[in-house]
Amino acid sequence: KILHIVRTTLRDVGFAIKGEIIMTPQLSSTVDAMYDGKPPTHWYVDAGGVEIAWTVPSLPSWFAGLLKRHKQLMDWLTTMRPNVYWLTGFFNPQGFLTAMRQEVTRRHAKQNWALDEVVPFTRVLACTNPDKHKQGSPGWEGKEIPEGVYVYGLFLEGALWDHDNKWLSNPKPGDLFVEMPVIHVSALLEEEANKRYAKGLWYDCPVYTKKRRTDLNFIYTPKIRIPSEEKKRRKRKDPRADPNYWVKMGVAMLCSIE
């Protein structure tokens, strides 16, 4: 639908400039928006004011996102299921993760898993290059992924990811956003997930589609590892070992930082 709207709009703008059709108010506002470097409003909001596509302030970024989203979906449709997904490319990432939970639950039908008893389980990988998990790419390692999905494209706000210790750390001065490594999102029975999370300390890190943190932009809340006092062996209490420390820092993950 979005591709049809964009094609129709650009075609009609060309005809209107040539004088072959009337320059309607919508086409006039489209030309003004494109002149200002912004995507036309009706490309991402319908007549009722409901968002029908992603919102990005600049036209080049919006159109680049359109091409990248189209490529991800077309590759999935024409070739095979990808090993790693660009989470930002989904207009409804909540639905994508719900479908993942349903798939994992069906795989364990013999163990009588129920969807209501299954919770997301998140693990941050050491890999920062998603091509290592893309089949056919130059960097592909040829490994099959376990249950769940690999996702990338998330940005951490208010903290950075310590690759050596594999936990959250204080951000560097001037770094507002830091790109996260590839993340493995799966599903486990709540009892099993609690057993795995019993090892170490964790922060419930909310994930949003964009910088404006509202319920409409909320996706889900994975547990992200934070520093452990036992491993540090400090005499003084490390404030970073308290999940409330990261709450006060306003730490969250974002799909888009524009």
Image: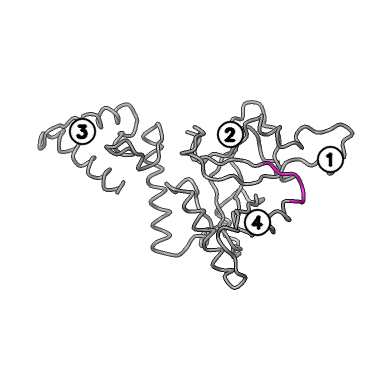
The residue mark sitting in front, 2 or 4, is: 4
Q: How is the image coloured?
A: one colour
Q: Secondary structure at mark 4?
A: helix
Determine the CA span between mark 4 and mark 1. Answer: 29 Å
Q: Earlier in the sequence, mark 4 or mark 1?
A: 4
* Residue 139 x, y percent position in the rendering: 57, 57
Q: Please give the residue where the numbered disc 1 appears in the rendered image.
A: 232
Discs 2, 3 touching: Cβ within 8 Å = no
Q: Work out whether 82 lies above or below 210.
A: below
Asked whether, in this view, residue 56 is left or right of residue 98, the answer is left
Q: Please give the residue where the numbered disc 4 appears in the rendered image.
A: 190
Q: Secondary structure at mark 2?
A: strand
Residues shaded magenta: 198-203
Q: Please give the residue where the numbered disc 3 appears in the rendered image.
A: 27
What residue type is disc 3 on?
A: Leu
What residue type is disc 1 on?
A: Lys
Q: Please give the residue where the numbered disc 2 appears in the rendered image.
A: 177
Q: Work out whether 246 lies above or below 185.
A: above
Question: Which residue is found at the position 41% from the left and 35% from the top?
Answer: 56
In-front residue for pair 242/159: 242
In-front residue for pair 84/111: 111
In-front residue for pair 219/211: 219
What residue type is disc 2 on?
A: Phe
Determine the CA span between mark 1 and mark 2. Answer: 26 Å
Discs 4, 1 touching: Cβ within 8 Å = no
Q: Earlier in the sequence, mark 4 or mark 3?
A: 3
Determine the CA span between mark 2 and mark 3. Answer: 36 Å
Determine the CA span between mark 3 and mark 1. Answer: 62 Å
Discs 2, 4 touching: Cβ within 8 Å = no
User: Is 200 within the magenta?
Assistant: yes
Q: Earlier in the sequence, mark 2 or mark 4?
A: 2
Residue 36's disc is none
